[in-house]
Amino acid sequence: MTATRVLVLNSGSSSVKYQLLDMADGSRLAMGLVERIGEETSRIKHTLLADGGSTRERTGPVPDHSAALKAVAAELDGDGLGLDSPELAAIGHRVVHGGLTFTAPTVVDDAVLREIERLVPVAPLHNPANITGIRTARQLRPDLPQVAVFDTAFHTTMPEYAARYAIDVETADAHRIRRYGFHGTSHAYVSRKTAALLRRTPDEVNVIVLHLGNGASASAVAGGVCVDTSMGLTPLEGLVMGTRSGDIDPAVIFHLSRVAGMSIDGIDALLNKKSGLVGLCGDNDMREIVRRTDEGDQRAQLAFDIYVQRLKKYIGAYTAVLGRVDAVTFTAGVGENSAPVRAAAVAGLEGLGLAVDPGLNAVRSENPRLISPEGSRVAVAVIPTDEEREIAQQVYALVKD
Ligand code: ADP
């Protein structure tokens, strides 16, 4: 029997998301989530997608990631899809920060694990959970390839002048301070799918990808290669996000410290958790914000306008970076679902060759689609992202021979 299945694990600080895919036909066999790890009321939700589909849910204490992964293995086992199945080819792990070392998916051994650990200072919120996930999976199936797929990898092609901050070179290098970018798996997948939608190959097209989820980032992709992206050393830079500020004058931090007497941890929490849409209007769900603006809510309107202004700035900047743009593509929760955000982000950019057809923009669909008027100079597209599938494909391509 050939092993064609890949289990994709996305271990966050208090959650583990997983999907089991069969790369023989691309089908999704099972998916699920363990959340609130470490609390009394942890929740496991497991969905079997094969055989017509069914969902099981239960709550109870899951003390740590090791217990979470064992619970995932038990759920899969219950459906005859356990980790000991000979059809399982590999386990793919989403790892947020791969620094400059990891430019491609990598089979994990002790040296790789040490290097991912070495990157913890630049990704303190994310890499520790990813490492725990890998360690536990290795204990469960020591003989199986464990492959790390890095959020930063797609952006390692950025030229030095896009990746380097204009700060003292020695200081920056001593602390590995540079722009790494994130959401790379999504930007890679969506830019490639955009080329397919345009019936071209990735090397023929220049695309601006707008990944607008709770976290949000933009990238400029020239001929399939990332040349700039909006997130930086951490996922805080760039677009306005659900709870993160995106770009601000760094002197705001000195000001909050010196004048408002805030601690560094307090400022960190302010900019990462209490800013962005939530800081501006109290909500970070775009559906709720649009509903409030429809009712004439001024705070929600201002939050929406600030969000859109930032998007326009990045579309303009990346048009300049790319020189020629073939498509602007919206993806992730907001990008795939919010017609008002897409319309507003492109409004007034006719000079850049951009327009949205209101009828096409209003269509709700889970398929990749164009929303620009026929014959537009620059295509505007909506492409649902699928990070798990992209991870599974990259993992399978690495281990299948
Ligand atoms: P994450 O970054 O957590 O992976 P997602 O890509 O799932 O996020 O995006 C989540 C966000 O998408 C929500 O916070 C919400 O703002 C937005 N969203 C989801 N569905 C809709 C919808 N139907 N209309 C507008 N916005 C939506």
Image: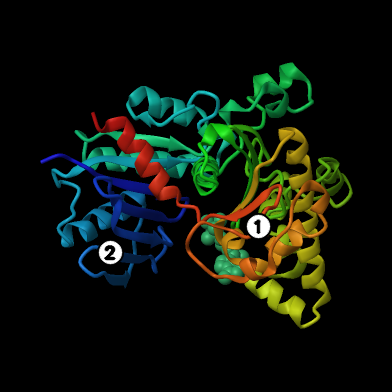
Q: Quadrant of residue 332?
A: bottom right
Identified at 50% across, 41% down, the residue is 192
Count of number-bearing discs = 2
- Residue 374, label in figure: 1
Q: Dividing the image into 4 quarters, which one contains the N terminus?
A: top left
Classify 175 as above or below 395: above
Q: Is residue 66 left or right of residue 165?
A: left
Quadrant for ligand 1 reads: bottom right
- In this view, the residue in front, 132 or 31, is 31
Q: Is residue 358 left or right of residue 313?
A: left
Q: Is residue 93 left or right of residue 375?
A: left
Q: Quadrant of residue 5?
A: top left
Q: Amino acid at mark 2?
A: Leu
Is the residue marked by circle 1 packed among few (<14), some (14-19), or many (20+) residues within 10 Å? few
- Residue 59, label in figure: none
Q: Position of residue 275 (x, y in %)?
A: 72, 58
Q: Amino acid at mark 1?
A: Glu
The secondary element bearing badge 1 is classed as: loop
Classify 353 as above or below 305: above
- In this view, the residue in front, 282 or 224, is 224
The secondary element bearing badge 2 is classed as: loop
Q: Earlier in the sequence, mark 1 or mark 2?
A: 2
Residue beneath disc 2: 49
Q: Position of residue 90 (x, y in %)?
A: 26, 39
Q: Position of residue 219 (x, y in %)?
A: 64, 41
Q: Is residue 378 left or right of residue 298?
A: left
